[in-house]
Amino acid sequence: MTSTLVIIPVFNEECRIQRVINQVLKFSNVDLVVVNDGSTDRTNEILEKYYIDEIGIIHHKENLGYGAALITGFNYAIKNNYEIVITIDADGQHDPSYIPMFLDEIKKGYDIVSGTRYHPQSPIRTHIIENPKKINDEIVEFLKYKLGIFITDAFCGFKAYRVDKLAELNLTVTDYAFPLQILVQAVMKGFRIKEIPVPLIFTNPRRNYDKILGSIEDTIQYFKKVIINEIDKFKKAEKK
């Protein structure tokens, strides 16, 4: 077992999951676990092709949500005493060749290293999809206003974490607002956070909000509510 675990949450990605797994397996210095979040397409069949000693596979019997899949992966990392976790989405948005960069950065003393698709130095490999960008821009400004944190990408799933720091968090959000819960708790606890540019690759324009609410405006309000709730919970806990 290595000290680094790559976690891939997957739901119905039969067209892309095998390619993503094979790219990650090129790195001999990381372990890999796939959390299959109740897929109903051929994802299960594809995962069965891999020997158990190649990757770990955790199955959710039903689709519980993006955040729920990552929470399962994090718990696995904590239980098995990994030092570093890297998360990569299964839909091809993230280029696994950047894994060494994430490892280099987090070993410099950061607690979370977060990819950003919207940094001026981020390579653009597909066109920017307007709606996710609009949501991100408004939430980034809201985070700056509420927490004083300056980031450019609030939702990128390509991240590295120190596992001992993950163990300090109380993670309960099961949907696509999950990155916001982690970010707010990390900031409130004083974690050291760094963004690094990663390629912008949109493979699914609805990726960030298709399971939240119908309209962009309602989705933004929901995300803001999650942020406010996390801040309020932290402040109440401090008063006790």
Image (cartoon, rainbow, N blue to C red):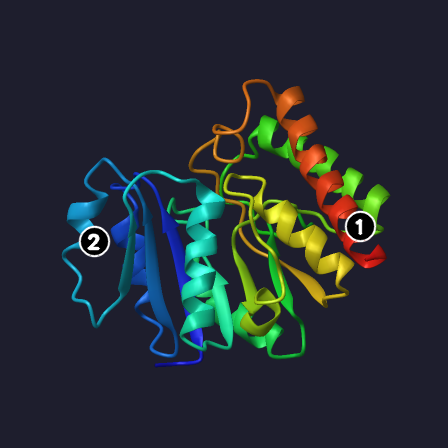
Q: Residue at x 48, y 38 (%)?
A: 202
Q: Would residue 212 be visible to someone looking at this image?
A: yes
Where, quadrant-wise, is the C terminus in this rendering? Answer: bottom right
* SS class, disc 2: helix
Q: Would residue 121 be visible to someone looking at this image?
A: no
Q: Position of residue 187 (x, y in %)?
A: 75, 58
The numbered mark, 2 or 1, whose residue comes first in the sequence reads 2
Residue farthest to the front, as pictured: 240
Residue farthest to the top, as pictured: 215
Q: Which residue is mark 1?
A: 236
- Distance Cα–Cα, label 2 vs label 1: 44 Å
Where, quadrant-wise, is the N terminus in this rendering? Answer: bottom left
* SS class, disc 1: helix
How many residues crowd around disc 1 within 10 Å: few (fewer than 14), some, or many (20 or more)? few
How many residues crowd around disc 2 within 10 Å: few (fewer than 14), some, or many (20 or more)? some
Q: Position of residue 49 (x, y in %)?
A: 14, 57
Q: Up-down: is 57 above or below 107? A: above
Q: Which residue is mark 2?
A: 47
Q: Say which of 76 and 86 sits in front.
A: 76
Q: Say which of 14 and 233 sits in front.
A: 233
Q: Residue at x 53, y 30 (%)?
A: 209
